Image (spheres, helix red, strand yellow):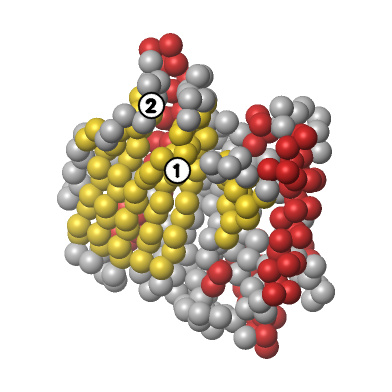
Amino acid sequence: MENRKDDLQQMLKEKYEEVKVPKEAKERMKMGMEQAKEENKKNKKVVYFRRAGLGVAAACLGVVALANVSAGTSYALQKIPVIGSIAKVVTFRDYTDSTKNFEASVEVPQIKDTAENAKELEKTNKTIQEYADEFISRYENDLKETEGVGNYELKSTYQVIREDEQELVLEIDTIVVMASGAEYKKVFNIDKNTGKIKMLADYFKEDSNYIDVLTKEIKRQMREQMKADEEKIYFLDSDDGLDEMDFKKLSEDADFYFDTDGNLVVLFDEYEVAPGYMGLVSFTINRSVFESLLS
């Protein structure tokens, strides 16, 4: 599981304070994106921001969930309502920290289930915790290095976005505010019968070309959006020598979930397929596009 994008495939980003990017600044912006993506290759498991000299705003480290106890940190156990007859979600830990101008409030979820699924759920909960541990460690390191100088606010919560007899879809939502704001979403699709986290491939026929089909549809939507709104820019069809940044193919480790109508929603981090000013982006793919490929 540690190789999955779901386990902290995050991106080194630079945040823009501009609400929109004028056409004449597109070249400079893409150069910044290229640099960020190059640095991201060196560290897939940490999401943070560094100051850059490209006329962009300083940004901050993204932090999500739980880790070791430190001064000013408190943990609490709190149950929330049962989700279904088989699985439920509890707040395993509340992480709070207030040190000078650094503040954090993080709800850490854990899946509870029947004894039959305990082994697999243990792995699932460990994955969620490992995802969180990386970020909280970075938070505390930055706090130590800066001694709380600056304004930093972290808030992370979770919600069940879809649940039925077979699956529980858990989403972790995190907002980090410093010089500018950043938002992160993480989705875990959990099989209630086994306790496992399901990957995209688990829903499709073996050896099917589902990745190609989904990629083609996402690119179609990208082009359609850019044609309709000149303020929308995706890393696609570059003609300025930066085509290596272009979105070429959907990853098998992509963040996703199926909505209540059976459509597939694919989510991308900031700077993954678009400049940072567009924030998190997602694409809803109608079930009719891929239904024949489902397992």
- Drawn side of residue 272 relative to residue 242, left or right: left
Q: Residues within 10 Å of mark 1 (few under 14, many from 20)?
A: some
Compared to 292, does 192 lie above or below? above
Q: SS class of the residue under badge 1?
A: strand
- The one nearer the camera, 271 or 81, is 81
Asked if residue 131 shows in the view, the reply is no
- The one nearer the camera, 288 or 99, is 288
- Drawn side of residue 77 relative to residue 159, left or right: left
Query: Residue visible at 48% across and 30% down?
Result: 164
Residue 252 rendering spot, x and y as whole percentages: 68, 40
Residue 84's mark?
Answer: 2
- Drawn side of residue 292 relative to residue 285, left or right: right
Query: Residue visible at 31% across and 65% down?
Result: 152
Residue 77 rendering spot, x and y as whole percentages: 21, 34
Query: Residue visible at 59% across and 63% down?
Result: 271
Q: Residue 102's quadrant in the figure?
A: bottom left
Residue 7's mark?
Answer: none
Amino acid type at mark 2: Gly
- The one nearer the camera, 146 or 26, is 26
Q: Are marks 2 and 1 in contact (CB under 8 Å)?
A: no
Asked if residue 165 shows in the view, the reply is yes
Residue farthest to the bottom? 24
- The one nearer the camera, 2 or 257, is 257
Amino acid type at mark 1: Ile
Compared to 218, does 16 lie above or below? below
Query: Residue visible at 65% across and 61% down?
Result: 273
Residue 161's mark?
Answer: 1
Q: CA distance from mark 2 to mark 1?
A: 13 Å
Q: How many marks?
A: 2
Q: Residues within 10 Å of mark 2 (few under 14, many from 20)?
A: some
Residue 229 rendering spot, x and y as whole percentages: 66, 76
